Image: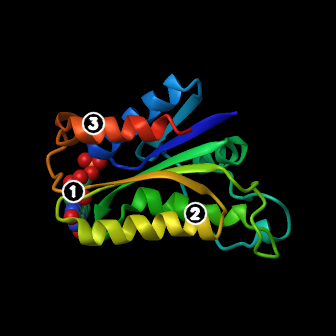
Amino acid sequence: MSIVAIISSPRGKGNTNTIVQAMVNGAKENGKDVKIYNLNSLSNAKGCQACMACKKAVGCAVKDDHAEILKAIRDAEGLIISTPTYFGEACGQFRLLQDRFYSFIGPDFVPNIGGGKKLATVVSCGGGADGAKAMADKIEGAMVGMLKFVPVGKIVFTGANPPDTASKDKTVLDEAKAIGKKF
Ligand SMILES: Cc1cc2nc3c(=O)[nH]c(=O)nc-3n(C[C@H](O)[C@H](O)[C@H](O)COP(=O)(O)O)c2cc1C
């Protein structure tokens, strides 16, 4: 059993990546195996095709680079998701994968991935907390409400336009590591 961590930002050493890495370190200190996926490095990553194959058989029928990630999440005991705020929303890389989570829901609209997987959510933004917090709540809310994940922590990191803002902020790094230890 392991943890899957999703990095959506195209910035290799950006804020969300730094915060996720601190969570990963916490989870590893807690004895967990962690597999990190960097969505921006995928060359063949589609959004949901609305084919509804997942409503006839378990799982997603689209065989692209997201398929391995969906399988890993299905098999994992916990998930770390992260995204920067772009135009008040999650970035495109994250949204493509998020729509594919539809394949975790069966024909009766009951999730078929097993409830109770632990979830941590990381959102970063250049501005203030209001929009980013609402977005993080919405992302987490869908994972909890539709897919029955159990939140162990959420970080909304604000005022973070330079990519190294989080790496200089011991408070957020400590918070992230503490959340990681909850896995
Ligand atoms: C295309 C683009 C759109 C953005 N839109 C917003 C926005 O709507 N609100 C905001 O507060 N920050 C916005 N930002 C700033 C990023 O959310 C911020 O720099 C964030 O910390 C980036 O995370 P990262 O370092 O993990 O890449 C935007 C940045 C880019 C590149």
**Residue, disc 2:** 143
> Which colour scheme appears in the figure?
rainbow
Q: Is residue 80 above or below residue 91?
A: above
Q: Give the residue type that dot 2 points to.
A: Met
Secondary structure at badge 2 equals helix
Element on which disc 3 rests = loop
Q: Which quadrant would residue 55 be assigned to in this image?
A: bottom right
Badge 1 local density, few (<14 within 10 Å), some, or many (20+)?
many
**Left or right of 125, for residue 29:** right
The residue depicted at 72 percent of the width and 56 percent of the height is 115
Q: Is mark 1 within 8 Å of ligand 1?
A: yes
**Mark 2–mark 3 contact, CB under 8 Å?**
no
Q: Earlier in the sequence, mark 3 or mark 1?
A: 3
In what quadrant of the picture does the N terminus appear? top right
Amino acid type at image mark 3 = Lys
Instruction: Give the answer, above or below, for where 130 lies relative to 85.
Output: below
Q: Residue at x 67, y 41 (%)?
A: 76
* Mark-to-mark CA distance, 3 and 1: 17 Å
Label 2 to label 3: alpha-carbon separation: 26 Å
Q: Earlier in the sequence, mark 2 or mark 1?
A: 2
**Which is more foreground, mark 2 or mark 3?**
2
Instruction: Please name the residue shown 73% across and 67% down the image.
Output: 105
Residue 13's disc is 3
- What label sits on residue 158 in the rendered view? 1
Above or below, 170 relative to 146: above
Measure the C-alpha gap from mark 2 to mark 1.
22 Å
